[in-house]
Amino acid sequence: MTVQDPIDDRARSLSGLADALDRLGFVLSGAAAAELGRERDRVGRLLRGVGTRAAAPDAPLLVVVGGGSGAGKSTTVNTLVGSRVALAGVVRPTTRLPTLVCHGDDHPWFASDRVLEGLVRVEAAKAAQAAGERTLLLATSDALPRGVAVLDTPDIDSVEHANRWLADRALDAADVWVWLATARTYADEVGMSYLRRAERRQALLGVAVTQLPAGQRDELLTDATRLIADQGVHLNRLFGIDHTEVVDDQLPPSAVAPLRDWLAALAPVEQRRRIRDRALTGLAAAVPAELGTIDRAVREELEHADRLDRLVDARFAEVAPGLDAELEAGLSLRAEVLDSWRRLVGGSELLLKVQTTATQLGGLVRDRLGLAASGRAEQVQAEIGDELIRILDRLLERATVATRRDLEADRAGLHLLERHPRLRQAASDRQRSLRTMVDAWQAATTELIEEVGTPRKVRARRATLAINSVATSAILVLFTVSGGLTAGEVGIAAGAAATSQWLLTKLLGEHNVTRLLEEMRTDLQRRVATLTAAERRPFDDAIGAARPPQQVVAALDEHVRGGR
């Protein structure tokens, strides 16, 4: 086993975490989603960079020169290489495009996409043709030793987001940080925040205080050292660059000689390996802190998703008891339905014949009476079905509208509705689904009657009433029962309901009637639950898609709270 094996293991783990983070959309974070997306991308690049470096421990070091506006980054880089390769300006921001300078032998490494992935490479000699905020200028210089490249970055305090983004990307990819601040800005909080970031990553860090006034060098460098130490930042080197004349965007070579010598000392292969190993170890240790913003956002989104789930649950949970209450109170057309059925069953001689001489009826009479009863039964079931559909449609619509209203009143819920405008639209196929469900339930009731009460079902088949007529009686009894069923008694409202109850008991037996009604009610409740689940599914799917994936949550737990 080599010293690189533990780093390789961490690299694979962190690369897998980066892939997991790519799945985060931050839908429930609203206005913060864009910024969180950028943070996700930044951390992902940082994590993947570990793999790139671990795979090539002998590769040239990337020394990133960072700092605020006017700190002299481009001027310092030009002085280090002895030519005007980085374009320094006077209009803020002074540096707009990052420029990477390396020895000619190292050019192939940096010309590829292995470092600073996603930036378009343009040779510095063609800088005038460069366009776009994702451009990286490349230059070569024999003044730099093999194995060390220097990157001039845009200002970290630029008013332009693209410049700050590029500067952050460069610093995230750095093996070595060289931080520049003027004699007036070395104590600024913005700069100190970056130095603290370098400390978290255990990066090799050099700080240069530029534009030091004559006679104040030692005092200012001492003060800078103290302030940086107060931040808990450990410097590897502190450089002072005196205020002096700039010619052709360069300082006198002696002004940066200590910095040049320090960089040259980093170039040998063994030294590069040690620096890269240190950087990788530091990055791995800094992962929990780097993930802080994303982890907090994911935790908040989980809370948002749980809350939205509860809102949906609460509204659609009202459908089943709402139906029970409606049916307990009675169907609004029940009097008409019962009266129609009473005229056929209760007001004719048919029931008496079923009671006394059902087995003696001739086939023709039986058939005629059966046809009459079957036709009327279908009519009654259709009326009941229509009423049941109307009730369910109203209950589902009420639940859906109330859910939308609750989501609109919730910040995360409103973001969800904006992301999924279809959630505001009425269900287009609800009536068809309801009709299918009710027809299937009524058909299942008919089949159930054929299965219940053996051998009494034989008597039912012999009776002049068709099976669907018996089913109609059962449905009417189910919808007119109040207070539930008992083993020996079924509470009946009146008239036709009593007649239907008597008919069922005569044909199937009291125990079987009780069982039949219980199974009918259970079957209806199951079908309504299935339909309710389908009605709420668009809400559930939208919340589920917005919820941070469990695999990502687990990966964050492992790396943030697991100490990896």
Image (spheres, rainbow, N blue to C red):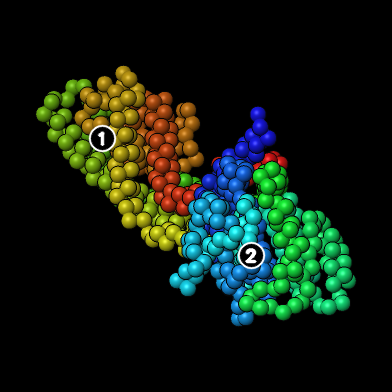
| 247 versus 77 height, above or below | below
Res 468 label: 1
Are the residues flagged by discs 2 and 1 in contact, CB closer than 8 Å?
no
In the drawing, does residue 232 fall left or right of residue 346?
right
In the drawing, does residue 58 fall left or right of residue 387?
right
| Residue 259 image offset from top left, x and y in percent | 74, 62
State the residue lying farthest toward the left: 364
Q: In this view of the protein, which residue sits in the foreground, 24 or 331?
A: 24
First along the sequence among labels 2 and 1: 2
Q: Which residue is mark 2?
A: 81
Q: Residue at x 64, y 55 (%)?
A: 145
Quarter of the view holding residue 244: bottom right
- Separation of residues labelled 2 and 1 (CA atoms): 97 Å
Q: In this view of the protein, which residue sits in the foreground, 510 or 166?
A: 166
Q: Give the amino acid at mark 2.
A: Val
In the drawing, does residue 65 fall left or right of residue 402?
right
In the drawing, does residue 5 fall left or right of residue 332?
right
State the residue lying farthest toward the bottom: 91
